[in-house]
Amino acid sequence: MASTSITEPAVAVPASEADAAPSEAALRAHEDRLRRRESMLRIVVPAAIVALLLLAWEWTVRANNIPHYILPAPSLIIRTLFDNWESLSSALWFTVKLTLLALVAAIVGGVLLAIAFALFKWVEIGLFPIAVILQVTPIIAIAPLILIYVSSTTAALLLCAWIVAFFPILSNTVIGLKSADSNLRDLFQLYKASPWQTFRYLLAPSALPYFMAGLKIAGGLSLIGAVVAEFTAGTAGKETGLASRILESSFRTEIPMMFAALLLVSLLGIVIFIVFAALSRLVLGHWHESEMRRER
């Protein structure tokens, strides 16, 4: 008996449907356009809002004839900034140095202590309460004592800024080191990985996103600590920061000068945040969900 085979007829796909299916290159180009549009909106929209606020501020001062010693107009603040740039630039550089040095010291001390906390339980039990006490105590309350006991004013200011910036680095890094997947820990133990291999290939990658988050927080806090410490010290002279310029201006009732120094402090804080946000995207953007760009 002859065997018969049944074959299904081939279904032809209409040319219109094949053409309608987007190619991979077209999808990638569309995603690139969406990302560029989103990046542009992130810049244009805040800039437009800030410009409108500044225009409203300028108009309010001019329309109501508000004296400059009560509320200076933005145009007067910018002019004062350029007229006194020599004095303000040296103060800005001093504040930048103090902030960066405090931040570097906080990173080194916070990361090393966090590693000790993660590897040795008794170190965490003994020292973590002290770190918490330093964090919850207002820096404005202990800054006068630091200025009394530390002979160098610059070193005292650096210590105050370091205390403020230290805890976010420590706390976030400790949490990151402890957040490694327990199953992966068991796998490393199963394959008899050394402590250095476990730290290098498991603990450090797990802690990196938390460390970057702490770094963005500590960057702004180090600037706040430097400014608050200088306010408390009340130092004057050439080797001083923007906080001293603000104090001097308030004593002399030079309100436009005070606003100009305050503008530089704000811009410095914005630059610090933008730099660390970009660094976080650079380090984590190709592998971690917190920084990977997804189409919404």
Image (spheres, helix red, strand yellow):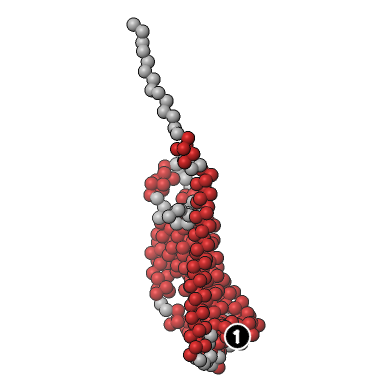
Q: Residue furthest left?
A: 1
Q: Quadrant of the N terminus?
A: top left
Q: Is residue 30 above or below residue 152?
A: above
Q: Residue at x 45, y 79 (%)?
A: 139
Q: Is residue 81 above or below residue 112?
A: below
Q: Along the horizontal axis of the image, is 20 left or right of 155?
A: left
Task: Classify residue 237 by image quadrant.
Answer: bottom right
Q: Residue furthest right?
A: 86
Q: How many residues crowd around disc 1 within 10 Å: few (fewer than 14), some, or many (20 or more)?
A: some
Amino acid tagged 1: Thr
Rendering coords of residue 38 (x, y %) = 49, 59
Q: Is residue 242 above or below residue 168?
A: below
Rendering coords of residue 40 (x, y %) = 53, 62
Q: Is residue 182 visible?
A: yes
Q: Residue at x 52, y 54 (%)?
A: 33
In the image shown, does 67 or 8 lie closer to the viewer?
A: 8
Task: Classify residue 190 by image quadrant.
Answer: top left
In the image shown, does 208 or 296 lie closer to the viewer?
A: 296
Q: Residue furthest top?
A: 1
Task: Classify residue 179 by image quadrant.
Answer: bottom left
Q: Quadrant of the C terminus?
A: bottom left
Q: Residue at x 59, y 74 (%)?
A: 97
Q: Residue at x 59, y 82 (%)?
A: 78
User: So how many labels did they put on this image?
Assistant: 1
Say which element carries label 1.
Answer: helix
In the image shown, does 65 or 68 lie closer to the viewer?
A: 65
Q: Is residue 284 visible?
A: no
Residue receiving disc 1: 80
Rendering coords of residue 164 (x, y %) = 47, 73
Rendering coords of residue 80 (x, y %) = 60, 85
